[in-house]
Image (cartoon, rainbow, N blue to C red):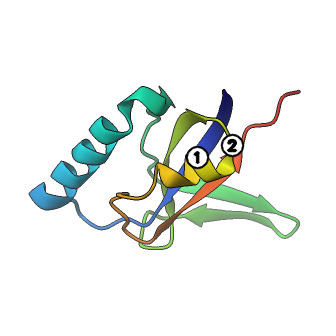
Amino acid sequence: MRKFVILHQGYITPTEEIKNAWMGWFAAIGDSIVDSGNPFSVGRELTKNGWRDLPVGIDSYTGYTIVGAEDMDAAAKLLDDYPMITGARIYEASAM
């Protein structure tokens, strides 16, 4: 089983409907979850030009979840009923 990191993107104030959608999605993929992750709050980005603050908003990465799957296609399939705000990215966690 390989590990994949899902980065959640987009934030709006959660309604009861949004909260229920997320809880339903986590329940549906429960057997594949390696680490349910944590939400992110404000952040900071370092570039060659220095630091900039990253507020939480519609374009922010707002959390992560680590799942186990056979391959990228199987990991992507876990997002079929994903409660999307803006989007998500999936990266395979490579072995060192």
Q: What's the residue type where badge 2 is placed?
A: Asp
Instruction: In this rendered view, identify the residue nearer to me: 96 or 24.
Output: 24
Residue 2 in the figure: left or right of residue 57: right
Q: Quadrant of residue 85?
A: bottom left
Rendered image: mark on residue 71: 2
Horizontal and vertical percent position of residue 65: 50, 40
Kind of residue at badge 1: Ala
Q: Residue at horizontal 56%, vertical 63%?
A: 54
> Within 10 angstroms of label 2, few (less than 14), some, or many (20 or more) residues?
few
Instruction: State whether residue 2 is above or below residue 7.
Output: above
Residue in view at x 10 percent, y 56 percent: 16
Please report the residue visible at 47 percent of the width from the left and 31 percent of the height from the top.
32
Q: Is residue 23 above or below residue 57?
A: above
Q: What SS does tag 2 mark?
A: loop
Check contact, mark 1 vs mark 2: CB within 8 A: yes
Quadrant where the image shows the C terminus: top right
Image coordinates for residue 73, horizontal then vertical, percent: 63, 53
Q: Which residue is mark 1?
A: 74
| Relative side of 63 to 17, left or right | right
Q: Can residue 49 be seen here? A: yes
Q: Residue at x 84, y 70 (%)?
A: 49
Judging from the image, what secondary structure is the residue with disc 1 in?
helix
Q: CA distance from mark 1 to mark 2?
A: 5 Å
Task: Give left or right: position of 74 versus 95.
Answer: left
